[in-house]
Amino acid sequence: MKYALFLGCKIPSQLPAYEASTRAVLAQLGVSLVDLEFSCCGYPARTISRDAFVLSAVRNLALAERAGLDLLTPCSCCSGSLRHAIRFLQEDEQLRARAAQALAREELVWSGKTRVEHLLTLLARRLGTDRIAAAVRSPQTGLRVAAQYGCHTLRPSNLAHCDNPMAPTLFETLIRATGASPIDWPRRLDCCGDPLHQANAPLSDSMTQAKIADALASGAEVMCTACPHCQLRLAALQSGSPGPAIRTLLYTQLLGLAMGLPAKSLGL
Amino acid sequence: MSPAIFQTALYLSLALCALGLVWRVSAWFRLRIGPDAQALTLFERLAAVSRGTASALVSRSVFRVLAALVFDVLLQYRLFVQAKLRWFAHLLIVAGFTLLLLMHALAALLGDALFPGYQPTLAPYLFLRNLCGAMVFVGAALLLYARGRQQTDLAQTRRLSGAAFMALLGLVLASGFLLEAHKIASPQAFDRMAQQFAGTADSAALQALRALWASEFGVAFGDPNPAPDRLEQGRELHRNACASCHSVPSSAFVSYPLARVLGPASGLLDAGHAEIWLLYVHLFACFLGLASLPFTRFFHVLAGPLSLLVNSAAPERALPARSASPGSRAACRALALDACVRCGICDAHCSVAPLARYLGNPGLLPAHKLLATGALASGRLLRPDHENQALQAAEGAFLCTDCGRCTSVCPVGLDLEDLWQAGRGDLAAAGLPAPAQWVQARTAVAWADSLEAEAGPQSYSDLYAASAPLSADRSSFSRCVQCQTCTNVCPVVAHSMGSEHGVDLTPQKVMNLLRLGLRELTLGSRMVWDCASCYQCQEHCPESVRVADIMCELRALAVRRLGAVRPTREAA
């Protein structure tokens, strides 16, 4: 199994542990990753220009297509962006023509072949929880974990193709495969507050705090994430804050620990 | 050249160079880049830099600095990793130029100390000088070639000072080689030297020597086929009087072929005192280079290495601009403006470079952002004639994803992420914040009023159809039955309850305004701008209205429409 790894912009500079743990875990599971020099998924430009957003996204899809690979991303927002861009292209013939023209200047073509896979669906669907459970060497038995899905992992469900958007179980199944115990918590599908941070910091903080309080009240010891935005937001709000704190772990870190990989190789 | 003219010109250019250096270096302590640098006094900044330098030199970081001196400064390892051809060209120029400076330009001062028995005409120096000159020439040519290949369709950031410096370097090299070539071919120069070193020989022997130098060493006497015995006689005298102090001119492998070309004209050149004016051109080009050093791109020969050393002092992954005191940080940022040669490597790797292209805004690219940061610090960016550049810079600051690639590839090790962070703060303070901020300056109703007041003959239907197809197409929202499901599942609405920072409308009301044809009233709405794009509304809508997608479109529309009716800068 081979993918072009789309890290997005946040992971390399601000969350290198996600890259390290993703590589470590996938190497154990026999997934090989190819590095291409991708550009921004387009997400920040969606507020400026639909065209620029779509063209930036489709450039990445075309790069993967040239390499003959599907694209794997550990970032929920990047995954969402790329899928939205694909949808807009499918809906709008003129936009498709503009995209083809822009790509042609770099001798790139996107014919629609590239699939976008999020890390969680790769693990749960392509590899399967049995294979994951089989790789576990030191089960995290008894660890109570709150699954933080991340909005764009699930929604809109007709693009994300992940799980039932109202009552998903995919992340919990993956957590159970590590030996840990997923907990039920009312705010598990809520937004982490990150996208709002620039526009309205107090409201964003209130959303993040509510999630942390809810996870704690529901008995979680760890909040498990699968998106750099969620992870960074939850960590940033808790650093230096006097309120009750909860440990945040990336799913690849939790899985890596369960596989018995050295903590250092997981960025811990 | 008369010593008086030479000395006057030399000291004048030295003085200009020194003054320029003081001016440029003082900028590292004067320019205020970043909100944390605004309140610092000159004294605080000088003190912070002195403290930082001292503590770096007496701690373990001195080893990192020494390693950087060898690998990053002398061997240019960072450039090697990024661009092999430019690295090679750069080393050629640096090595050639440094050797020429020490061996040739400063011969009177350093010649004997560094190069025992130095004589410009002697082996290996005659050859070495040509080699060094050729290295600089080839290096410069390769750099120009590499730059040419790198040309993008975006507006270039290369400044005139870079071109001016290259032209000056070319003039120094060309005049130097021409002067040497002319001296090789010149009968006048031959006669002068023969007079000096073989003056006691009889005229027949001198004639033989001339014949020998003409046939074997390229002096243009116009006697191509002398008799063999005359040549032998000339060779005898050559061995006694010339050979010990003069290598064969052909070892000057650039100037000698040039001399053969100049040969036919050398009589004319002699008559026109070419030796004197070529020397003047050569020396004055050098003096001009010296005097203008602080004002051209050439200043990077000081700022670049300094930046590499300063940045190496911090531990791995903690660049000094972020770990140091505000005073040192401010100096690092100002130094970065001088150390950058706009090589464009950061631009080539920038994550949002495709966006720059599609938006037609070079202000997104690191090299442009660096210029804009400098222009903002000097106040130039806020002048009315720079309005467009200011807007482009603001968009660039907003769209930068902080991916850090520019910092990791920069050949002079600049902490560009820190510079962007600082620049973002300065832009916001100057009334050029991100759209989410400037939109908040007015209420949705006030924005709608501004749009109405603008009401010209313009039609926006094309803009809407192309850039906001969902909000332009009634069928995408006319199904809305105002059931409030979107509002009920919206986390932003939920957290707005009882908060003074809450939103003004609800998603359902935004949809209703669209249904009523009051699209302009939504553009400045807090609901539209505080939407978290979590897609709960869209997922839950029983009528499959793409609420969140429409919200995104409305923001992009607002940037265009509201951006057109706002002043460039919000009142700070």
Image (cartoon, coloured by chain):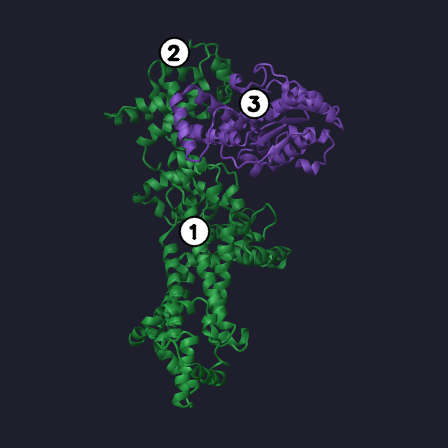
User: Which chain did the renderer colour purple?
Assistant: A
Secondary structure under tag 2 reads loop
- Residue B78, compared with residue A37, is above or below; it is below
The disc labelled 1 sits on which kind of residue?
Tyr
Secondary structure under tag 3 reads helix
Q: Number of numbered discs present?
A: 3
Q: Which residue is mark 3?
A: A153
Secondary structure under tag 1 reads helix
Q: Nearer the viewer, mark 2 or mark 1?
A: 1
**Mark 1 or mark 2, which is nearer the start of the sequence?**
1
Residue B567: image location, x then y, percent: 32, 35
Q: Nearer the viewer, residue B414 or B32?
A: B414
The disc labelled 2 sits on which kind of residue?
Ser
Q: Chain of mark 3?
A: A
Residue B201: image location, x then y, percent: 42, 89
Q: Nearer the viewer, mark 3 or mark 1?
A: 1
Q: Which residue is mark 2?
A: B478
CA gap between label 2 and label 3 equals 28 Å
The disc labelled 3 sits on which kind of residue?
Thr
In the displayed structure, does residue B499 sit left or right of residue B265? right
